[in-house]
Structures are given as structure tokens and as C-alpha cells.
Image (cartoon, helix red, strand yellow):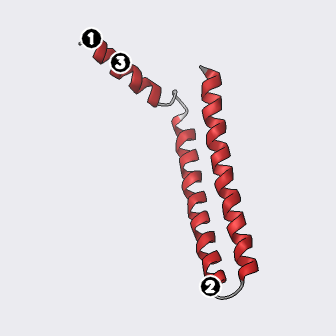
Amino acid sequence: MHDHILNESSRESERTPPPGQAAIVLAGFAVGVVLLGIQLWLLTVALDLYLSGHSVNAWLLAVISGVVFLGGLLILFMRARMQRVRR
């Protein structure tokens, strides 16, 4: 029974950021939400342009949206790698 309590507390400490880093985590989350909103807006405008016959501009916006997505994935992988290096 004591092992179960110990495991829960150790898992809880792994999930919470170190002191002073909560603001950084929240700022990163806010930036991610803003980038997601921009990406959805870009895709909406691209679809509207594509349906109105302006396919060149639509593809440009779709590519920009893809770059935003790939940038988010890159940041996610870099963050995971930095956490592995620290441990």
C-alpha cells in the first residue's frame, strides 16, 4: 500500500513543472493556442479562395498553414528532447 502512495506522488512530481516554470509552460500553451487559431483561419481563407477559383493563392495559404503545423511539431520534439537530456 505504501508503494502505491509513493508511486502516485512520484508521478505527480513528474507532471508538475519545476518552481518558476509554470509561467513559461502557460505562455507556451497560449502561443500554441494562438498558432492553432491562425492555422485554422489560414485554412478557412484558403478553402474560400479555392472554391472561388483563386487556386494559386489558396495553395500558398495551405503551404503556410503546413509550415505552421511543422513548426509546432518541431517545437514539440525539441521540448521532449530537452526534457530527456535534463534527466
In the displayed structure image, the side of residue 63 where residue 18 appears, left or right: left
| Residue underneath mark 1 | 2
User: Going from the N terminus, do you reach mark 3 or mark 2 first?
Assistant: 3
Q: Position of residue 39 (x, y in %)?
A: 61, 64
Report the amino acid beneath label 3. Answer: Asn
Is mark 1 in CB contact (under 8 Å) with mark 3? no
Measured Cα–Cα span from mark 3 to mark 2:
55 Å
Residue indicated by mark 3:
7
- Residue receiving disc 2: 51
Circle 1 Cα neighbour tier, 10 Å, few/some/many (<14 / 14–19 / ≥20): few
Q: How many residues crowd mark 2 within 10 Å: few (<14), some (14–19), many (20+)?
A: few
Name the amino acid type tagged 2: Leu
Q: Secondary structure at mark 3?
A: helix
- Residue 50 x/y as whole percent: 66, 81
- How far apart are the alpha carbons under marks 1 and 3? 9 Å
SS under mark 1: helix
38 relative to 72, above or below: below
Which quarter shows the C terminus?
top right
Q: Is residue 71 above or below residue 58?
A: above
